[in-house]
Image (cartoon, rainbow, N blue to C red):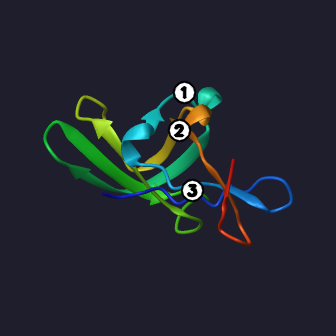
């Protein structure tokens, strides 16, 4: 399984979201996006398509993977994504301990 390791940080670089499975990300309008990925690899798998890219533009930032339904027209370039923030887990970036 591929996980998203985001470079997003909160509150003075102390907290960061946990890795997120690619099936928890869904494409959306840019105005609704939690993050925007720059897709550079598309892997059709029949009923699903895995897309891979970077969070901080072309060639930079954290790598990301998202699982899309095959009906979604996956293309290289910008892909706005969202996820349910209630399912995010946060960790202290210094100790690695989960913050409840």
Q: Mark 3 or mark 1, which is nearer the start of the sequence?
A: 1
Q: To which residue does mark 2 refer? A: 80
Q: The residue tagged with tag 1: helix, strand or loop?
A: loop
**96 vs 43, nearest the viewer:** 96
Q: Quadrant of residue 92?
A: bottom right
Left or right: where 78 falls relative to 48: right
Q: To which residue does mark 3 refer? A: 55
Instruction: Give the CA distance from mark 2 to mark 1.
Output: 6 Å
Label 2 close to label 1 by CB (< 8 Å):
yes
Q: The residue tagged with tag 2: helix, strand or loop?
A: strand
Q: Is residue 53 above or below residue 68?
A: below
Please identify the residue farthest to the bottom as the structure is shown.
94
Q: The residue tagged with tag 3: helix, strand or loop?
A: loop
Q: Mark 2 or mark 3, which is nearer the start of the sequence?
A: 3
Instruction: Give the CA distance from mark 3 to mark 2.
Output: 10 Å
Residue 29: assigned label? 1
């Amino acid at each position: 399984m591929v996980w998203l390791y985001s470079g997003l940080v909160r509150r003075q670089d102390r907290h960061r979201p946990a890795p997120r499975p690619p099936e928890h990300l869904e494409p959306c309008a840019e105005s609704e996006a939690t993050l925007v990925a720059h897709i550079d690899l598309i892997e059709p798998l029949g009923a699903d398509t895995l897309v891979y890219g970077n969070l901080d533009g072309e060639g930079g930032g954290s790598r990301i993977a998202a699982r899309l339904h095959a009906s979604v027209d996956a293309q290289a370039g910008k892909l706005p994504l969202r996820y349910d923030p209630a399912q995010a887990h946060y960790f202290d970036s210094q100790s690695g301990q989960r913050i409840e």
